[in-house]
Amino acid sequence: MNWKEIRRDFPLLTQHPDIAYLDNAATTQKPARVLEACRDFYEERNANPLRGLYDLSQRATEAYEQARETVAGFVNAHSAEEIVFTRNATESLNLVAFSYGSTLRPGDEILVSVLEHHSNLIPWQQAAARTGAVLKFIPCDPEGRITEADVRSALTERTRVVAMTQVSNVLGVENDIRRFARLAHEAGAVFVCDGAQSVPHLPVDVQALDVDFLAFSGHKVYAPMGIGVLYGRQELLDRMPPFLTGGEMIEYVTRESATWAELPHKFEAGTVNASGAVGLAAAIDYCREIGLEQIVERENALSRVAFEALSAVPHLRLLGAKEAEGHHGIFTFTLEGAHPHDIAEILSADGVCVRAGHHCAQVLMAHLGTPSTARASLSFYNTEEEIGRLAESLRTVRRRLGYAE
Ligand code: 7TS
């Protein structure tokens, strides 16, 4: 695999060779192919999909529904009806928490882990507040690991929902979703998987994992911003009330009431982001052409380089797993005596992009006793040279802040 050549598929990276983009957990860069697919939609097929009877609108509808088929195949859904397009993982998780969450009763229990991004926490806090359900937390150890015993001891006969991320956006640790979903099902609960950080980096198969819902964002998997996915098991989606209401999601409307459209349209109110969906399909095709296995291998190799390089930086403390394999390309760290925002600003002056702050995971930060960290996150298009720049720049931070060494 010629990774140098693959990197040239990304116009922003080519046009800005001075930038070492290491914030891929926040969003990824876009290959030219994806940008062209979006442009092609607007130049060749643009009309409001799912409405018009004329040819152009039908072409728009076909492109949109073809994208849904591509996504369904990518996550191995049973059918395309199980794929709902949303704006992002956040909206997908809100949809589940609002709609499936409306079936919760006072005293029912919702389980989340302390690793969760706020997008897989606040919607459940709100669902609990609306219904009288109780929100409970599964703890993790200092390296971010959650064991089967942790999940077993949190489950009760009142647990109705277990919502958990597959890969932590802070620590990069991977949860054993297949096993935890089985435990949830044995307890009579549904399992909601936040795939925002796993779908871009691992093959994710909803049938093999046996999850009831999977949420992810297009923009983290080389597609445009503004398109996201919710996979839901058909029998559950069928029984759930709509989330947003209005045009396109209805079957029949009177002055007083309405009936709902078939899946997945029941959950797609209003004009959809067809060009985004087409861009997402192009991004999936692109990743498949490189090969998911190759992507995993390449990102593991880069992870080993980053783990070694960061471990050798004086005064740096790496959070999470004590070996490269447990990171999935995500490296969160503190540097003694340096505020993470100062680290990010100093690195930025050297052209190195990293994220600093609580990473929208304040419960985890409180659990770990660290209010704020810096984070570098990798993609297959990153290079060993960029990781070297990161480590070199980090070595200068304390000096630039006025420390003797
Ligand atoms: N879930 C996880 C695990 C995430 O990492 C993120 C975004 C989301 C949900 C929400 O995704 P969105 O596309 O709806 O915003 N995570 C990050 C991050 O780590 N830095 O910026 C965004």
Image (cartoon, grey):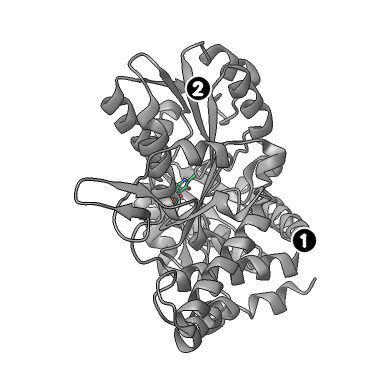
In the rendered image, the quadrant that contains the N terminus is bottom right
Q: Amino acid at mark 2?
A: Pro
Write down the residue under mark 1. 294
The picture quadrant where one finds residue 57 is bottom left
Residue 230 seen anywhere in this rendered image of the structure:
yes
The picture quadrant where one finds residue 34 is bottom right
Q: Amino acid at mark 1?
A: Gln
Q: Residue furthest right?
A: 1
Residue drawn at 58 percent across, 75 percent down: 31
Q: Residue furthest left?
A: 255
* CA distance separating discs 2 and 1: 33 Å
Q: Nearer the viewer, residue 400 or 53?
A: 53
Q: Nearer the viewer, residue 12 or 74?
A: 74
Task: Decide if residue 239 is on the left or right side of residue 302.
Answer: left
Label 1 neighbour load within 10 Å: few <14, some 14-19, many 20+ = some
Residue drawn at 64 percent across, 51 percent down: 79
From the top left corner, tell me how far across and down residue 102 is, in percent: 35, 31
What label sits on residue 139 in the rendered view? Answer: 2
